[in-house]
Every structure is written in structure tokens, then in C-alpha cells.
Amino acid sequence: MSTYSRIGISVTLFLFLACQFIACKPSSISDRLPILGEREITETDRDGTKVIDTLYHTIPDFALVDQDSTIVSKKTLKGKIYLADFFFTRCPTICPVTSRNLLQIAKHFVNEPRVVIVSHTVDPKYDRPYILKRYAAELGAPSNWLFLNGPKAEVYKLAGAGGYFSFAQEDPNAPGGFDHSGAFTLVDTDFRIRAVYDGTKTDSIPKIITDIQHLLNKG
């Protein structure tokens, strides 16, 4: 494993553990899920009155292509709650596990139009839309699951601390040629991160389903 991979994984692990500490805390029915990431307090003048606002970390703009060669952007996902991850179709390690776990979640919410699963390939050169479409069909992925392809630089940037608090990069020494996190990131309708989970653990599924339902009910 390269030095850059070790550094990247260390940073991601720190972010992931910090988020997990918050995301996995039990909450009462009346509690709202926390909003993760850095925040900025701003003060504005509105008609002579000082108003204090909080600006939260949000997912940056993006424009990627799904398995049907349709452009997907933040505009596409407006008003949706979604669970995001990073994978590649030829992944020999964690992707088969994370995909099976996401499949359970996608099927659970298949009749809920406000919930979407969004998987980003870290191998866009190979994982063209027709490959992603075939992968989705073989997996049995329902229609609420988008498989996205885009320029590596954009996707890898989205994965990091400025985006989903995950990790992705090309590494010839890694199995399959790519390093990436097995994290699932829960994003609300305002594109704020509300939780990060270990997507390799099947016992995370009930927690994820509960948290998504919580966002649907209470925001």
C-alpha cells in the first residue's frame, strides 16, 4: 500500500470514527439526528435586526451519469433523503458485502419516493453506464438505486472530507487497483450529512433503516 493510501485511510478512519460516535448514539423518539461536519455561525442584518444563522457542511455540486446514461445532480436529488457509498463492479473485497447490505435497504424503501440509494463507482473508465446497468440487474437492484459514473477527480473529491466523509483513490497496490471506504453516508433533503455507518456490517442495517425513517418522520 502506498504512503498516500495510508495517509488517506488514516484521515478517513478519523472522520469515520468521529461520525460513528455521534451517529451510533441511541436517540429517543423525540430526538433529531445530529448534523455532522464543520459549521459556520453567520450574522446578518435583516431590516435592522441582527439575525444569527448556522451554515452546515453540505455535499458540493456535482454532475454524474447513472446506469441509464441520465445526468444526476443535486437538482435530481432535491427533496430526497439518500444513502451514498463508493464501490466498483470488479471489487474483489468489500463491495459484494456492501452491495448486499444496500440491497436490503433499497428494497425496504422501494415504495418510498423520498428515499434513494446512490452508489459512485471509483473505476469510471471500466464501469461505464452499460456495465453499471448490467451490475444493477445482476444484483437485483430496485429502481430507487442509482449507480453513478463520473470523472475520477470529481468522484474522489466528493468522497473525501469536503463531501461524503468517505475515501476513494486509485492505487495499483490495492486489491482490484483501487482503495475506497466501505462507509455509507446518510444525507438529508438539505444535502447535510446526518450519519456515517460501517457498510460492511450487516448488523448496521436495522440502525440505518430506523434513522432513515426517523428523517422521513421528523427531519
Image (tube, rainbow, N blue to C red):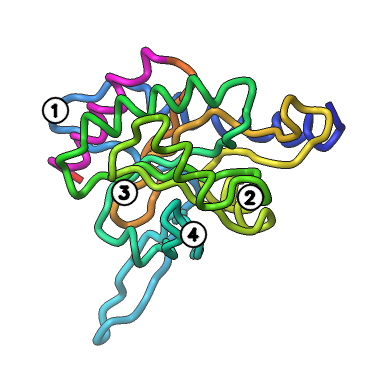
- Return the residue at label 4: 65
Residue type at mark 3? Asp
Q: Give the secondary structure at mark 1.
A: loop
Q: CA distance from mark 2 to mark 3?
A: 26 Å
Range drawn in magenta: 202-218
Judge depth for marks 1 and 2 and give the one in front: 2
Would residue 12 appear left or right of 111 to someone viewing this image? Answer: right
Judge depth for marks 2 and 3 and give the one in front: 2
Would residue 131 appear left or right of 204 to someone viewing this image? Answer: right
Residue type at mark 4? Val
- Return the residue at label 2: 124
User: Reading the chain from its start, which is encountered first: label 1 or label 4?
Assistant: 1
Name the outermost residue toward the top: 203
Give the position of the N terminus as an image quadrant. top right
- Return the residue at label 1: 29
Would residue 54 appear left or right of 37 to someone viewing this image? Answer: left
